[in-house]
Image (tube, helix red, strand yellow):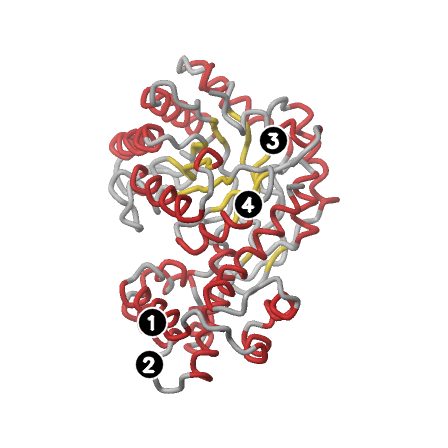
Amino acid sequence: MTNPLHDIANWRHEAGPSGIPSVCSANAMVLRAAMRATAPTALPLLIEATCNQVNQDGGYTGMTPADFRTFVEGIAAEEGFDPARLILGGDHLGPNPWKALPADEAMDKADAMIQAFSAAGFTKLHLDCSMGCAGEPVALDDRVTASRAARLAAAAEDARPSGGTAPVYIIGTEVPIPGGAMEELDTLELTDPAAARTTVEVHRKAFSDAGQDDAFSRVIAAVVQPGVEFGNHNVIDYDSAAAQPLSAALTDLPGICFEAHSTDYQRRAGLAALVRDGFAILKVGPGLTFMLREALYGLDQVAEELFPGQRSRTLRQTMEDVMMAAPANWDRYYEGSGAERALQRHFSYSDRIRYYWPQPDAEAAVAELFALLGNRPLPETLIGQYLGARYAAVRGGTLAPKAEDLALAAVEALMQDYLSACGA
């Protein structure tokens, strides 16, 4: 069966969508909203899980690739979203979760991981072996990176389900750290066009040397740095003019487009320019959960206005307690005074609060919030005050003034930016 992404490099030269958003989240509400936004379009829905989030050991979500597929398909069944329109991807698949081990051991674990992704029917696989393991440099050269990537492709090919859709591969690793940069940024160095071409050619040779020419024929994209990023406090917007030399390199790379990571918080015009310039795959993750958190905190305020004192703790108080009790996912990423770090815990663009929504206390607090607000229409004036971005749609009659609808609509609104930019 032909992979629907196989010819994505040619989409911008044909009628129809020119690119696709990649939803990088394991949050059920985010995925539900993404399905609702994508359903009326001509695009499939691409959902990706990272190597740390989902792997054969469970990752930080506790889910294996097979578990994640079941999870996503369960939400699709509830939403009436055709599962045939789902594309599942694995991001940064390589030794990263085990890089403290010697390379041989870490790569054995990476082999097992990508086989689990492939066997579970994930059909978009990003091969990322750029990081050094125990006793190695922090970053590896292109030849070692490509050789290890070819090894992982061979492992994925061996594990493919019989008769299933052949996976497509993403190569290249010139991306920011997961979750965005830790410092405030002023400028970024874009990938050198020659380096992008070299990355592809070195991988082509490594795949051929490993007997994986067929797998390389399904390499559809290279990850590069187009000049987009966000830190805790600011966003670097896409500069199309500055990216033209990199974009032009695609003329030398037939069948390949570029994949842009950390596109979160780019404005719709910037996203559209990225797609127009050949960055056909737009990765977004923290931006979606940021919008969800914004809506949940707005509903939290509405609940305090309508039902003061009926909860022992507000949602925001609960999230503060949860994060302070387990600081590993935010502590080393946020800098400044105590007050500055407190602000970042809840409102940083890097949105490291997203790691805490699956915690039992957080889940219980969200459930309590929705139970308290119920299915009743909420006052328009409070929506205007605390969820102002949703007010116009409520007043216009296109959005029900109800808690869950308002929360999902916040995520859907951001998805609409991506879908519009992709020409869906």
10 Å neighbourhood of mark 4: few (<14), some, or many (≥20)? many
User: Looking at the image, which is closer to me, 244 or 78?
Assistant: 78
Q: Amino acid at mark 2?
A: Arg
Q: Which residue is mark 4?
A: 38
Q: Disc 3 versus disc 4: distance between alpha carbons?
A: 22 Å
Q: Disc 2 versus disc 1: distance between alpha carbons?
A: 8 Å
Is the residue 406 above or below the residue 252 in the image?
below
| Circles 4 and 1 in contact, beta carbons < 8 Å | no
**Which residue is pictured at 44% across the width and 26% down the height?**
167
Label located before the other in sequence (2 or 4)? 4
Residue 199 seen from this side: no
**Which residue is pictured at 71% across the width and 36% down the height?**
245
Q: Which residue is mark 2?
A: 311
Label located before the other in sequence (4 or 1)? 4
Tell me where residue 339 sits by quadrant.
bottom left
Task: Look at the numbered disc 3 and give the secondary structure of its residue.
Answer: strand
Q: Which residue is mark 1?
A: 368
